[in-house]
Amino acid sequence: MADVLPEAFLRAVAEGFPSDFLTREPGELQEYGRDWTRVYSPAPSAVAFPRTTDEVARLLALCNQYRVPVVPSGGRTGLAAGAVAPRGELVLSLRRMTRMDPVDLLGNSVRVQAGAVTEAVHHHCAEHGLTWPVDFASKGSSQVGGNIATNAGGVKVIRYGLTRQWVLGLQVVTAQGQVLELNGALEKNNTGADLRQLFIGSEGTLGVITEATLKLAPLPGKQDVFLFAVPDVAAVLRLFREARRAPLLLSAYEFFTDKCLARVQRHRKLRSPFEAPSGCYVLMEAEGKDPSEVESWLGSLFERGLVTDGTLAQGASQASELWALREGISESLSATGLPHKNDVSLPVANLEAFCSELDAVFSERYPGWEIALFGHIGDGNLHINIMKPDDMEKAEFLAHTKKADPTMFELVRKHGGSISAEHGIGLLKKDYLSFSRSPAELEMLRTLKRALDPNNILNPGKILDV
Amino acid sequence: MADVLPEAFLRAVAEGFPSDFLTREPGELQEYGRDWTRVYSPAPSAVAFPRTTDEVARLLALCNQYRVPVVPSGGRTGLAAGAVAPRGELVLSLRRMTRMDPVDLLGNSVRVQAGAVTEAVHHHCAEHGLTWPVDFASKGSSQVGGNIATNAGGVKVIRYGLTRQWVLGLQVVTAQGQVLELNGALEKNNTGADLRQLFIGSEGTLGVITEATLKLAPLPGKQDVFLFAVPDVAAVLRLFREARRAPLLLSAYEFFTDKCLARVQRHRKLRSPFEAPSGCYVLMEAEGKDPSEVESWLGSLFERGLVTDGTLAQGASQASELWALREGISESLSATGLPHKNDVSLPVANLEAFCSELDAVFSERYPGWEIALFGHIGDGNLHINIMKPDDMEKAEFLAHTKKADPTMFELVRKHGGSISAEHGIGLLKKDYLSFSRSPAELEMLRTLKRALDPNNILNPGKILDV
């Protein structure tokens, strides 16, 4: 581990900040030096725990002065190693910055510090009939700042869009330690380029988000949760087309294959939702306008052979049971095996062609391997999990997938897709960025990075090298 | 008029482009040198009419080489002089680039060239039950590229959000003549900073938008249109709070004062919607979930004294009549007098305090003057129109308002507002930008501009000087 912290920097921190501001304790370095990606070894030099924006600003000014590389760090639930510190960086943890202001009931918004946990924000707003509709399985650990810095997606994007749409204002500290207050609590503000947008999704490489004013939505009305069995991916897409034109307001349209279901059943000891096995399953959540209309739409699906089986959850506990089949997948794959994860997206119109060509890639590169497909297919987003064969060594498996990934990414590119729909790039997908961004785009990304962080202290080496 | 076009540049254009590519005809210079802002005199050196992205790219490369300043130009319906060419610039008109691809019914999107007229896009999509929900009075002239470059707002923002939310992909030509294809037709794509967002709302100062893939929404269901009479702005806001919690999906919540109504009635020869006069009016458009629920909600408004009068349009023609009262305001103010326009926004929670303090500013700076207030109050957006007194010269009026504006902008700043909610900055509001953006933000805007357009050829002098 290279220790990159100059003595003078450490003295300045000791003099200017509280005594519990910085830790270099090995256990904490291990803990705060990594996110949920388990491919890189954490090796930070120190971890800082600021309590205020002013502390963040003063710290970054010092880091800039002494050229100390900084890894901004939230709930560390990321899957692309965006919050991993493998090279002696200083981790800047936002975990002490958890303040949540009272909910603004006139503006339907709430200002919080970046370290507020997603689920805590949900609880904070729910008593007022409001929610921040950024929702995914790791909401119990993920933090607001990290959600914004990664433009998090999740299971409700089809109804609410990405995190980007639910941020009214941002407070950001620049690489130079300047504090920007961007857009306040305004819905409309056309006064030059919208700097907020630069920081949303930039994975901490352009600035550190310290506070945010979140836009809130009314809690949704009564949701119906459906589970359907269909033979294959083409049928999943056919049903999607129908569902989008149905008398329903869709809030989730998720799919998974029989392989995923088998892993969830094995890990969580659940019984099968249907008597006959099926190739694919669709979990659909929707707000119906009129129960009898929904009923007759449902009937027509069977009549027209669009589904082979289906169930509508009766009550909240059945709904949770159905959701558990979908939300348990990621955890079950990791608990029962070693998945190599990819998170791609395609234009919805190209999904079918992509999926049928994908099968050819699988048979060529992974003949006979177990592949678990699931995802937010209504947004064009597929999670592709190649499972390590039981009789293969981990190193051989990783080497094999690394070699095979480009074939798949080539297919993604051919169909106008993205090699990272919602996980981000971080360190994990950096080598493949050019499959989704052109040389001109990469050059513009570098230009922006150099302009805003000339000393390259903010999450250096993440997304791309400058 | 300074002619800034070097001979060598003109020769290169003559050699490399069709003979009808460039015009220097005085009538066309006048026409294409201005937008709907009538404060600056148009004085372009030439107007170019490319047909393809390749022509735009080659033209910009030449402009960059010869340091020719360029004003990108769409439907020229802007109100902040963002598309005015007052200093010998080359106007780059997108008017020949009107191609619209077939609607993608799987992806609910459509790719069009930047010169496609907003309303033409609406017609193109409507037959498929879809719409691009960017909607405002000038939609018959405004173009897609201009809408995106100004992040246009309008009357449906409360339901659909700003233009920014309805852009999947952008094709942009940089100052150096490079073509960027940003985001294709993807809903989800977290592969580094989202460059699309930089160009949306940057008023042609960072790049020229040549094509866009627009995200489409289903055409809305049956809309109810209501007109309510209420005594004052406080009552408008009280009613808004109720409406937002009503069993309705709001698509518009617009207000106007008695002064606006009087001007519309005078200009369009319309009769009063209600028997008794009132201080303020609210036009509300909404999709009701259940007619009987809407009925009883409406009744409760009267019972609780929240409105003094009200009407629900019976049928489409009555609905248009009510809408005409609101949509005719801008035109009627200009036709019956000379308005000095401001377009401010406030956090919704601060609107009431702002409006009550605004009265004090009016009595101090404009004692006894006619002031016509209207706007998209559900988004916190107020259009403030100071009408020229009949017995005052135009020059004196303009000088007076220019002196008085900062007092109002100071109040906007105090309440966390924006001096330009949807019109943009252009030339018209440039001197006041610092009321809405901090010195650190202005410096970052300059840094971005210098990084992306080092020779300052793209709409130079608009938004801010570098």
Image: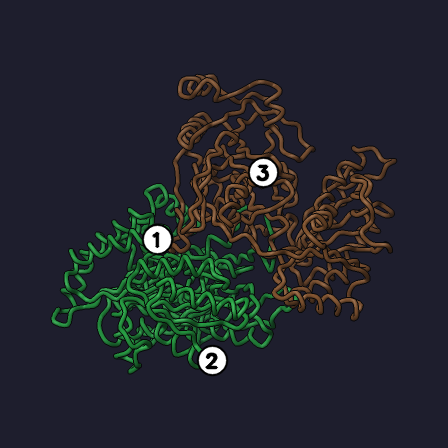
Chain colours: A green, B brown
Residue A285 location (% of width, % of height): 44, 69
Cα distance, mark 1 to mark 3? Answer: 31 Å
Labelled disc at residue A346? 1
Mark toward the viewer: 2 or 1: 2
Residue ID at (47%, 40%): B450
Cα distance, mark 2 to mark 1? Answer: 34 Å
Numbered-mark total:
3
Nearest to the observer: residue B49 or residue A114? B49
Residue B390 location (% of width, % of height): 86, 36
The reply to whether residue B49 is in sight is yes
Labelled disc at residue B142? 3
Residue B233 location (% of width, % of height): 77, 58
Badge 2 or badge 1: first in the primary sequence: 2
Q: Left or right: where does residue B172 sit relative to residue B354?
A: left
Disc 3 crowd, CA 10 A, few/some/many (<14, 14-19, 20+): many
Residue extending farthest to the front is A303
Q: Left or right: where does residue B172 sit relative to residue B297?
A: left
| Residue on which the image places disc 2 | A315
Q: Chain of mark 1?
A: A
Residue ID at (43%, 61%): A243
Residue ID at (26%, 50%): A411
Mark 2 residue type? Gly
Labelled disc at residue A463? none
Mark 1 residue type? Leu
| Mark 2 and mark 1 on one chain | yes
Disc 1 crowd, CA 10 A, few/some/many (<14, 14-19, 20+): many
Residue ID at (39%, 30%): B54
Q: Element at badge 1?
A: loop
Disc 2 crowd, CA 10 A, few/some/many (<14, 14-19, 20+): few
